[in-house]
Image: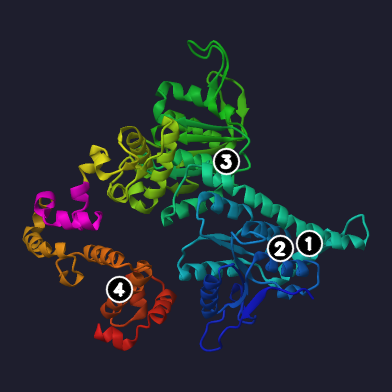
Amino acid sequence: MTQYNDTQHLTSNEQIPIVTVNNNPNTTPATLWLIDDDAALRLVLADTFEDAGLNVISFTQAQAAWTRLNDVLQQHEAADQLPDVILTDIRMPMMDGLSFSDWVHQHFPKLPIVIMTAHSDLTSAISSYQTGAFEYLPKPFDLDDAVATIYKAINYQPNLVVLNHSIESNTNVSTDTKEQPANKPNVVKSARKSPKAAENKAQEKPKPQTNNNPSGIIGQSQAMQTVFRAIGRLAHSPITVLITGESGTGKELVASALHQHSPRAQQPFIALNMAAIPHDLIESELFGHEKGAFTGAATTRQGRFEQADAGTLFLDEIGDMPYSTQTRLLRVLANGEFFRVGGQQPVKVDVRIIAATHQNLEALVKQGKFREDLFYRLNVIRLPLPPLRTRPEDIPALATYFMQRAAKQMNSAEKQLHPTALQVMQSFEWRGNVRQLENICLWLTVMATGDTVMVEDLPPELLETIPSLQEPHPLQNLSVKEATQNQQHSDGVYSPHQDNQNNQNNQNNQNNQNVQNNQVSRTNENQNWQQALAIWAEQSLQTGETDILQTATPEFERVLLKAALNHSGGKKIAAANLLGWGRNTLTRKLQQLEITASDRQDN
């Protein structure tokens, strides 16, 4: 028997709920195969899923799990040894998670796989769904969310009888060839070669994706992860998509990504902005015209629908389309047919429609400016894009990307953003969204002096809003030295924006005179916690301490945990909701931080 690199974690028999396939009470607990080369994360996940009522078998690498599945495929092991769901990482030695998922999907199509990765970009999301993954989990993720995802995968999976039948049929197909049963080992050999070939492909692809970023869509925030998941799920579908969002959020980039990763990728992608075309020319632009259809129509001309045949037509700012044209568009969406302007014969096309708008189409329908039936035709799948101001954590990566691109465009050296300047940019409202940020980075590349962009190098529109944006915490976006200096003169900087808190600010200004002594012990209740934390961090670094984040994080979590538990009267579920955690996460934190009931009461 083949030796496996796996470890089975037995579930506890003390008050642990048992999870079964399709919630069948008469079956054994569902089995999860957990594949990750990170030992610490593997241990945490195994404990979590065991507490959730699953039988967990851990693998240190995908190669070991593949070997075991291949033995089932070749009937060296019984089919009842198959798991009910697999959770795997992407980047691992010997065999990556994507090639493993692709192989499993080919040979065990009924077996759901959930892919997790720390490289949570658009490429990883799309690649995961293309390999047949049930779901995609970007790290870091909440443990309760992971448990919920695994539950969905288990309940989604058909029963094992159907799965066993598919295994038998797959085996018969593999061996039912013109050659003799000696061909059976060839199946194993080919199966063993295919993951390596897929692994080489998987290793070749990430390089241009990481360096060149062909899609131009960047984001690590939860909002963008939702967008990535949607693109991954919708890319291979011909279904109509309506992209909504403010101007500058990247609607055309998303539409282009949907096309590039679809089966129509080799066909035309035609983008048309409804707001940029005169109303009397829109029908001719969309549907084309026959020779002599109107004055100046000297020849027959194909419209955008014909040009996009077998491909994708992106209709931007669909809310600006004239009402009369909406009727003709509705016919195309219904049966794929239209007439050229002045034409007598219908033209048949196969076009995927992706529409986008920054307007509220429901409001336009109520106002009678947009056809209700067309709205429902377009609104099959709605994909909302988040504004940039709601995901400031994505600004550093976006700014770096745009600064690099601007440097290449201007044929100049790339400039770096000072951390303080970057913090100011993260606090900005960005009404123009990503497009405005791109323009700012181009402006900085041309106008800023030196290799490092300082706060004073930022354009006026960013500098003018700093006081108002920092009103709640005047010092949170400044360095400690700047905070120490500016705190003593806060009346002249911030008081115009603090009319409602003049008395409190006067008291703050008096107390903050002592900040220059850099004594954390003198920080009183009128000072904000960010300032106290900044002073502590600088003091620790000046004394030669290292790993200060590892020191501060447990203390920070301990304070918040105790406060939430006291506020909730010791009720864990209520405290978890206050903190935005799941119950399992809170329980794990209590154990890690060794917080007891007496600690909560003393606090």
**Helix, strand or loop status at disc 4:** helix
Q: Nearer the viewer, residue 432 or 469?
A: 469
Extreme residue toward the right, this view = 180
Q: Which mark is residue 260?
A: 3
The amino acid at mark 3 is: Gln
How many angstroms separate mark 1 from mark 4 (CA)?
54 Å
Residues at discs 2 and 4 in contact (Cβ within 8 Å): no
**Helix, strand or loop status at disc 2:** loop
The amino acid at mark 2 is: Phe
- Image point (38%, 83%), residue name: 594
- Image point (60%, 83%), residue name: 10
Q: Earlier in the sequence, mark 1 or mark 3?
A: 1
Q: Which mark is residue 170?
A: 1
Q: Is residue 9 left or right of residue 602?
A: right
How was the colour assigned to the protein in this rendering?
rainbow
Residues at discs 2 and 1 in contact (Cβ within 8 Å): yes
Q: Nearer the viewer, residue 313 or 78?
A: 78
**Within the magenta stretch, is there residue 25?**
no
Q: Which image quadrant for residue 365?
A: top left
Q: Earlier in the sequence, mark 3 or mark 2?
A: 2
**Helix, strand or loop status at disc 1:** helix
Give the foreground label among 1 and 4.
4
The residue indicated by pointer 4 is 560
Tell me the magenta residue range: 466-494
Q: Is residue 412 left or right of residue 230?
A: left
Give coordinates of residue 98: x percent, y percent: 63, 57
Q: Earlier in the sequence, mark 4 or mark 3?
A: 3
The residue indicated by pointer 2 is 108
How many angstroms separate mark 3 from mark 2 (CA)?
28 Å
